[in-house]
Image (cartoon, grey):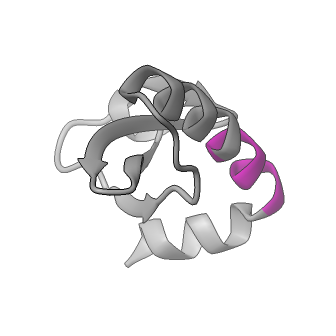
């Protein structure tokens, strides 16, 4: 799990015929301070790479940029 602004990002690498990609799971850091269910939302990273390590590294970089630019969309998805 990685930190991206006010969120945690978990990257789950998967190998496909064309290379590796990641499914990214986002959750709010503050939600871990409270007991109960943690809201999560998922996105498929647009990054494709030749290894699981490379795709994880690049996908987390992409996720950090995504959080900065699309915070409102992310909050809307986590509120459902």
Prevailing secondary structure of the magenta residues: helix
Left or right for 57, reference 26: right
Q: Which residues are magenta?
A: 63-69
Left or right for 61, reference 55: right
**Above-or-below relation of 31 to 32:** below
**Res 29 visible:** no
The residue at 57%/40% (across/down) is 59
Q: Position of residue 44 (x, y in %)?
A: 44, 62
Q: Position of residue 48 (x, y in %)?
A: 52, 49
Left or right for 66, reference 27: right
Give the image quarter of residue 61: top right
The residue at 58%/66% (across/down) is 75
Give the image quarter of residue 12: top left
The residue at 17%/45% (across/down) is 36
**Above-or-below relation of 52 to 37:** above
Residue at the extreme front: 17
Q: Position of residue 41 (x, y in %)?
A: 38, 62
The residue at 45%/63% (across/down) is 43
Q: Nearer the viewer, residue 44 or 70?
A: 44
**Res 58 visible:** yes
Image quarter of the C terminus: bottom left
């Amino acid at each position: 799990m990685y930190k991206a602004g006010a969120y945690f990002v978990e990257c789950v690498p998967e190998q496909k015929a064309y290379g590796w990609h990641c499914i990214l799971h986002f959750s709010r850091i503050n939600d871990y301070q409270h007991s109960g269910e943690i809201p999560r939302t998922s996105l498929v990273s647009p990054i494709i790479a030749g290894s699981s390590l490379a795709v994880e590294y690049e996908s987390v970089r992409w996720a950090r940029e995504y959080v900065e630019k699309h915070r409102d969309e992310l909050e809307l998805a986590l509120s459902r």
